[in-house]
Image (cartoon, helix red, strand yellow):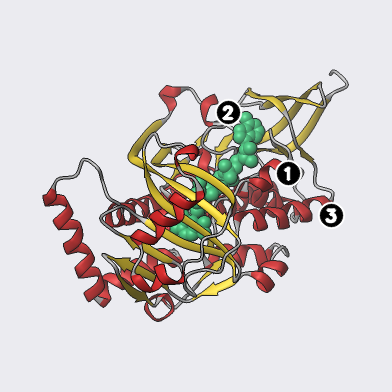
Amino acid sequence: MPSHARTTQVAIIGAGPAGLLLGALLGREGIHHVVVEKHSAAHVLARVRAGILEPATVALMRELGAGERLAREGLPHEGLFLSVAGQRHHIDLQALAGRHVTVYGQTELTRDLMAQREAAGWPTVYEAGDVSLAGLADKPCIRFGEAGRPVELQADWVAGCDGFHGVSRASIPPEKLQTFERSYPFGWLGVLADTPPVAAELVYAQHDRGFALCSMRSPTRSRCYVQIAQGDSIEDWPDNRFWDELASRLDPASAAALRPAPALEKSIAPLRSFVAEPMRWGRLLLAGDAAHIVPPTGAKGLNLAASDARQLAGALIEHYRERSDAGLDSYSERALRGVWRAERFSWWMTRLLHRFPEELAFEQRLQRAELDQLLASRAAQTLLAENYVGLRG
Ligand code: FAD
Ligand code: DHB
């Protein structure tokens, strides 16, 4: 064996929420694992993404002993607002579904898990160059560059947690995968700014000009989004255009509370629904965005990544502790059940609240009718609330 050869039980590709949560779950059981991430820790932490945690994700952080700051700084939200054609309506999640969500940035959750890894001494390779996977059918080997030196990491199992554009899913022979996909003819432009949120809870706005969302990171920091045309670039959206457009899509009370401020960060996200089945090939197991993408409207992506990590960790722990592969054999099927429910909800909420450019007046009237029913029906609101806080079982 060359001197740069290493071995581990589980090689985890990617240090996003899926990879870091899986690593923490394995680490506390004493299962040896290495996280291999192609970017630096600073780069991973600079990506502004999700902000809403389901109760199950908060509970997972607490169980891992990584939830102390989340408990202190996370903002519990018992409801949300729907702003429809200029009128604001409250959806009481706590009353309808008996649970609430927590506002806590993905960057903060990532920071907490990275700090725990470092303190525990669990190995992480950042800035891994040219990561490639081989021997996935029976004897996995991960090759990458570390500080310019080639490394070969032998592992019993590989967890592909490297997001939608990673190498893991791409290493599965195409004929072994079935993929399901829908792209949406628009994107989201997100702005982070030091300005107080327009309301105490999130405002999801449906408007003829397009969707908008006012979220937050703290009582003094807002995270807001507007639906933009496909092909638009950041240069098309100077700060003043963004704030004007956002205001024009909000109900009068929310718009009046809006205080434009310079963007600390501005980014565009495409909207996509995607599922790859199965989530396992040989000794490679996929988790999080590597296996599935939801449009961000339902705030489900990070929570799905956490749910995959929990299920995959359970299966691997069973393998090492009880010498049983039952959990690994059924992982894909079990995970996909929850994935498809989140896909359905995210697709539904996207369709309900966005302006589809090619849509006929007929579909627009149907959208309006569905919104009317939602705002009038406790049963319809309960369904939304149960999905938003996370379905159980
Ligand atoms: P990622 O976070 O994508 O992590 C994958 C990691 O793998 C990255 O660090 C990447 O650098 C690394 N990697 C990639 N390729 C390689 C390689 N070849 N080798 C090694 N490493 C590699 N979700 C919610 O639940 N709630 C929300 O409110 C929400 N809002 C969102 C808003 C926006 C604008 C966006 C874009 C997303 C949002 N999401 C939300 C989705 C959420 O951010 C993702 O679903 C989540 O990041 C998935 O985590 P992951 O670990 O699977 O993948
Ligand atoms: C945020 C993002 C979402 O996609 C969402 O549905 C709610 C909140 C956010 O970034 O805060």
- Label 2 and label 1: CA atoms lie apart by 21 Å
Mark 2 vs ligand 1: CB below 8 Å: yes
Q: Position of residue 210 (x, y in %)?
A: 31, 52
Q: Which mark is residue 119?
A: 3
Q: Quadrant of residue 207?
A: bottom left
Q: Residue furthest left?
A: 362
Depth check: give the residue in front, 329 or 388: 388
Local packing at callout 1 (Cα closer than 10 Å; few below 14, some 14-19, many 20+) is: few
Q: Nearer the viewer, residue 310 or 21?
A: 21
The kind of secondary structure element at disc 1 is: helix
Assign the C terminus to one quadrant of the image: bottom left
Q: Position of residue 43 (x, y in %)?
A: 69, 41
Looking at the rendered structure, the kind of residue marked 1 is: Ala
- Amino acid type at mark 2: Val
Residue at x 33%, y 50% (from the top left corner): 347
3 or 1: tag closer to the N-terminus:
1
Say left or right for 320 vs 148: left
Q: Which residue is mark 1?
A: 42
Spatial CA span between label 3 and label 2? 29 Å
Answer whether labels 3 and 1 touch (C-beta < 8 Å): no
The residue that label 2 is drawn on is: 167
- Please report contact status of discs 2 and 1: CB closer than 8 Å, yes or no: no
For residue 224, the mark is: none
The type of residue carrying mark 3 is Ala
- One can see residue 255 in this view: yes
